[in-house]
Amino acid sequence: MDLHTGKSNWVDSLPYAPSFPALEQDATCDVLVVGAGECGALCAFELVSRGLDVIVVDKRKAVSGISSANTGMLQAASDKSLHSYIHSLGPERGVRVYRLCRQAVDQLERISSMLDFDCQFKRRDSLYFASTEEDVPGLKKEYETLAKYGFDADYWDESAIGDHFSFRKPAALYSRNDAEFNPYRFVNALLLYVSRQGARVFEHTEVIRHTTDKEGIVFYTPNYRIRAQYAVIAAGYEAQEWKRNPNAVMSSTFAIATRRLNDFPGWPGRCLIWETARPYLYIRTTADNRIVAGGLDERTGSGTERERMLRHKSDLLVERLRQLFPHIPDLRAEYSWAAAFGSTHDSLPLIGPQESFPRCYFALGYGGNGTVYSMIASQLIAGLLTEGRHPDAELFRFDRPVRDVGVSI
Ligand SMILES: Cc1cc2nc3c(=O)[nH]c(=O)nc-3n(C[C@H](O)[C@H](O)[C@H](O)COP(=O)(O)OP(=O)(O)OC[C@H]3O[C@@H](n4cnc5c(N)ncnc54)[C@H](O)[C@@H]3O)c2cc1C
């Protein structure tokens, strides 16, 4: 699958990324993790922490899948509002999803602080604005729901937004304690960490088929075999080539990073910004003082079409930035990239076993909160693998009924 095109700013932020060998002989382990992106790295971290012997393989260079295209916003709120989750899952499970996301941000902070190089993790507030007047009642309802269940958010009207920012919008939710990080540095540092803890990481090592027997599961690369007790399939969007899930939706998304800026007038606290429109525009700043903006998603999953659209989408993203921040001079894109984007109809990740894949656990953090979902997936799978159960497994299981589709604000 053609995962992304163009160039993100992250790769240049780590010119000497660690490299790992390719597999050059047969191997055995407790758990094979397929995929050295953020989800595979987080799963390896949780499994190694529980004392398991882990091998991680990736058919590409490590961290060159979607995790290198990630824009690195870490938020408790997801693509779907809390009141929409409550509508489709009931209050207990809906609130549970938001609490898990909140905890996952804290856990990512803890893991970032353990790593060898700076992952540029920083706490940020979030501004979620109403894109149109029609979205205001939904935003008010979301504010009331968040308040009812103890989530920290303020409701701002148009004049409050205008008092703080260089733009006016009909209304917004302002919430605290989200975060941003550099996803490329994070995943590279995490792979280095797990390899120091005893995990074996092999890049340029593709799994092409597998068989199961009484003793475990055997994965085949073109030249060698890996025997494992269990496997975690963290193959990202390409896991749809293993088994297509009807809840998964593939599309395309676009992002830019500006040149380095001196100042961010009209943008207090350099908070994370996103909006109620779908697809939404989202914006953050980086440790080296760039603005990263993304969105303008298209339904197509074709890499060729993505590449064709990239220039135009990049211009549109810059234009949106200029409208929001007229006092920031000379806004232009220094990096632009287009990527495949996987989400689900019910805006929940797909985590757990799948029929016809014995001894395999899939970890697919699809959606705009993919990093936070990957964190949740890693803990859930570590629990399933070591204890045979996890209290949240039901929420994200592959064969769950998909009750309603498309309610977002
Ligand atoms: C432009 C963009 C912006 C985003 N922004 C955010 C954001 O701000 N916040 C957020 O939380 N999420 C964001 N996401 C989502 C997030 O990036 C993804 O959810 C996350 O990176 C997925 O990680 P992964 O490890 O599952 O996939 P990947 O990083 O793609 O890793 C999967 C790996 O599996 C390997 N693989 C596949 N098949 C095989 C095989 N057969 N054998 C061996 N290896 C194999 C691939 O080579 C790949 O490296 C964004 C996504 C995009 C596209």
Image (tube, helix red, strand yellow):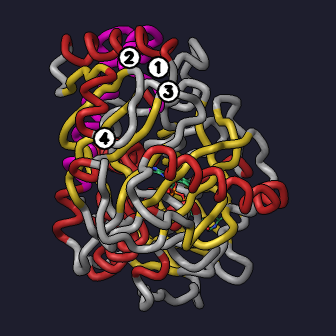
Q: Secondary structure at mark 3?
A: loop
Q: Are marks 3 and 1 in contact (CB under 8 Å)?
A: no
Residue denoted by label 1: 409
Q: Amino acid at mark 2?
A: Leu
Q: CA distance from mark 2 to mark 4?
A: 19 Å
Residue denoted by label 3: 131
Q: CA distance from mark 3 to mark 2?
A: 10 Å
- Foreground residue among 285 and 93: 285
Q: Secondary structure at mark 2?
A: helix
Q: Position of residue 274 (x, y in %)?
A: 43, 38
Name which of mark 3 and mark 2 comes first in the sequence. Answer: 3
Q: CA distance from mark 2 to mark 1?
A: 7 Å
Q: Position of residue 341 (x, y in %)?
A: 63, 48
Name which of mark 4 and mark 3 comes first in the sequence. Answer: 3
Query: Going 48% across and 87% down the picture, which residue do you hit?
Result: 20
Query: Going 64% across and 29% down the picture, which residue do you hit?
Result: 247
- Foreground residue among 27 and 353: 353
Relative to residue 241, is residue 47 depicted above or below?
A: below
Instruction: Say whether residue 343 is left or right of residue 175.
Output: right
Between marks 4 and 1 in the image, the one whose residue lies nearer the viewer: 4
The circle drawn on residue 165 is 4
Q: Residues within 10 Å of mark 1 (few under 14, many from 20)?
A: many
Instruction: Say whether residue 120 is left or right of residue 323.
Output: left
Q: Examine the structure image and report whether residue 104 is included in the region drawn in magenta.
A: yes
Instruction: Say whether residue 288 is left or right of residue 113.
Output: right
Q: Secondary structure at mark 4?
A: loop
Residue denoted by label 2: 139
Disc 4 under 8 Å from ligand 1? The reply is no
